[in-house]
Image (spheres, rainbow, N blue to C red):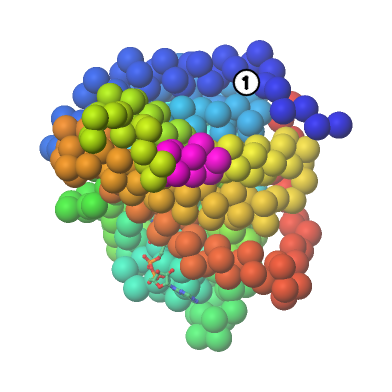
């Protein structure tokens, strides 16, 4: 049976996110974007509405919503500003859902509960100055010392790096395996702001997501108790890939929202701007761009809904999530480029939102697996070169 209608609960989350973004973010987003200002007040406001605990079960102080609700929230948030959705991508997608799935009882009590309440903000650091797509090229390493690990390394391009309290960090625990690029030598650790040797900084001069925080994390001999190892010592790569399955899902749904934002802005402008004595909405070449946005929106939405449905069923979804992310991000960049085109010279200035949409759309073709990496993933599935192996842990079905 295929049922594409939403439940009352899902519609409530959608409305909550839509109203929040319209009320709290839309009025100031252009000004903040121009100043590249991240407004820290946004986080407690999101927390108060439960947006930072979406999909985390109530027993861990979350809202207990399903994964479709998370996708709907991401669509609504990114329809107003990408940086808002990025918060859910890293706080819930990369970090909290990973803790929920791989964390011990103690780790969930210590870290997941305050994260779900929004009292502590979380992110994940995989990327480094010299390694992004090539995850096994990272250099951060963790040395065992008694019952502690001592971690040294540098993470870069990390969303909320300079804001977050809790971090999941990928590091080598087996340097012999690092030399052989054997990913079973990688491990994940939970780190906290305030640990000696851990410092963060903000990266300035970004093309997009200027109302969001992106930064670096430096770890100079950071001493971490062994209780903060996430999963087993040889499972870091698997955990990181698992985390990306959740982060990518939020990017797919968010980028779908960005396509809708471009469509809405373009339709409104095309109806009111006239050339050659008629609204530009009546020129066929403009209609073509609008039609593409409309069809891409529907297709992108169906793709993330399928991935979300699989997550709700507790089924593997790496392939579907990757495809949803690839399609939505490509379509969002095209939609944003054409939205600028439809606005003509006005689209080229920050008088209209589409200029920001265009800059923001580019980032999603790079982060959470670049466009090229997702094309390779899809090709390898289609060619039979890649198949999903069973994981020790799978994302829990919503209760
Ligand atoms: C705004 C923003 C937020 C981010 N947030 C986070 C975060 O929270 N946590 C985190 O860990 N990281 C984060 N990142 C980092 C992001 O995930 C990486 O930038 C991404 O994985 C790409 O890595 P890279 O930039 O090192 O590019 P590289 O890996 O150096 O790639 C450069 C180019 O080469 C292409 N390429 C690389 N290998 C291949 C190949 N085999 N075949 C074909 N083409 C190839 C890539 O597609 C890309 O076009 C963020 C990045 C940005 C811009």
Ligand 1 occupies quarter = bottom left
Q: Is residue 220 above or below residue 318?
A: below
Reply above or below: 378 against 136.
above
Residue 84 visible within the image: no
| Residue range highlighted in magenta | 287-296
Which residue corresponds to the image point at 77% horizontal and 46% vertical from the top-left? 315
Q: Quadrant of the N terminus?
A: top right
Q: Position of residue 30 (x, y in %)?
A: 20, 31
Q: Residue at x 45, y 33 (%)?
A: 260
Can you give x and y, in whole percent of width and height, for residue 52 in the image?
47, 28
Q: Name the one closer to the observer, 241 or 143.
A: 241
Magenta portion: prevailing SS class: helix
Is 85 drawn above or below residue 150 in the view shown? above
Residue 319 visible in image: yes
Image-quadrant location for residue 137:
bottom left
Taking the magenta stretch, the answer to whether it contains residue 290 is yes
Q: Is mark 1 within 8 Å of ligand 1?
A: no
Q: Position of residue 202 (x, y in %)?
A: 22, 49
Residue found farthest to the left: 35
Q: Residue furthest front?
A: 277
Q: Which residue is mark 1?
A: 10
- Looking at the image, residue 2 sits to the left or right of residue 94; the answer is right
Residue drawn where x is 51% and y is 37% of the image: 294
The C terminus is located in which quarter? Answer: top right
Q: Nearer the viewer, residue 142 or 364?
A: 364
Mark 1: few/some/many CA within 10 Å (<14, 14-19, 20+): many
Q: Which structural element holds mark 1?
A: helix
Residue visible at 67% across and 21% down in the picture: 6
From the viewer's side, name the closer residue of 248 and 173: 248
Q: Is residue 47 left or right of residue 23?
A: right
């Amino acid at each position: 049976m295929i049922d594409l209608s939403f439940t009352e609960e899902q519609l409530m989350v959608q409305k909550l996110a839509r109203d929040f973004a319209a009320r709290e973010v839309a009025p100031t987003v252009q000004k903040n974007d121009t100043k590249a200002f991240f407004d820290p007040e946004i986080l407690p406001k999101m927390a108060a509405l439960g947006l930072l605990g979406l999909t985390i079960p109530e027993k861990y102080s979350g809202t207990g919503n399903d994964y479709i609700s998370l996708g709907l929230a991401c669509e609504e948030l990114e329809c107003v500003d990408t940086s808002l959705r990025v918060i859910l991508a890293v706080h819930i997608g990369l970090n909290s859902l990973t803790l929920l799935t791989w964390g011990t009882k103690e780790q969930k009590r210590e870290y997941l509960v305050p994260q779900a309440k929004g009292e502590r903000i979380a992110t994940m650091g995989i990327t480094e100055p010299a390694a992004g797509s090539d995850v096994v090229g990272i250099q951060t390493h963790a040395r065992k010392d008694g019952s502690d690990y001592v971690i040294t390394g540098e993470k870069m391009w990390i969303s909320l790096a300079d804001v977050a309290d809790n971090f999941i960090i990928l590091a080598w625990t087996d340097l012999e395996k690092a030399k052989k690029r054997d990913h079973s030598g990688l491990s994940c650790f939970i780190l906290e702001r305030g640990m000696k040797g851990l410092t963060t900084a903000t990266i300035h001069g970004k093309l997009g997501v200027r109302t969001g925080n992106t930064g670096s994390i430096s770890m100079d001999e950071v001493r971490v108790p062994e209780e903060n190892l996430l999963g087993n010592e040889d499972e870091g790569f698997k955990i990181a890939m698992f985390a990306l399955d959740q982060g990518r899902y939020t990017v797919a749904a968010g980028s779908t929202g960005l396509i809708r934002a471009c469509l809405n802005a373009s339709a409104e402008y095309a109806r009111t701007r006239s050339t050659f004595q008629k609204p530009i909405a009546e020129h066929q070449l403009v209609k073509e761009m609008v039609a593409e946005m409309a069809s891409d929106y529907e297709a992108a939405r169906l793709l993330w809904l399928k991935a979300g449905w699989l997550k709700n069923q507790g089924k593997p979804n790496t392939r579907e999530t990757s495809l949803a992310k690839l399609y939505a991000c490509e379509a969002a960049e095209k939609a944003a480029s054409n939205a600028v085109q439809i606005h003509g010279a006005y689209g080229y200035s920050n008088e209209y939102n589409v200029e920001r949409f265009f800059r923001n759309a580019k980032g999603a073709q790079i982060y959470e697996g670049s466009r090229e990496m997702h094309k390779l993933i899809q090709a390898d599935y289609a060619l039979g070169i890649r198949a999903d192996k069973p994981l020790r842990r799978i994302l829990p079905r919503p209760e």
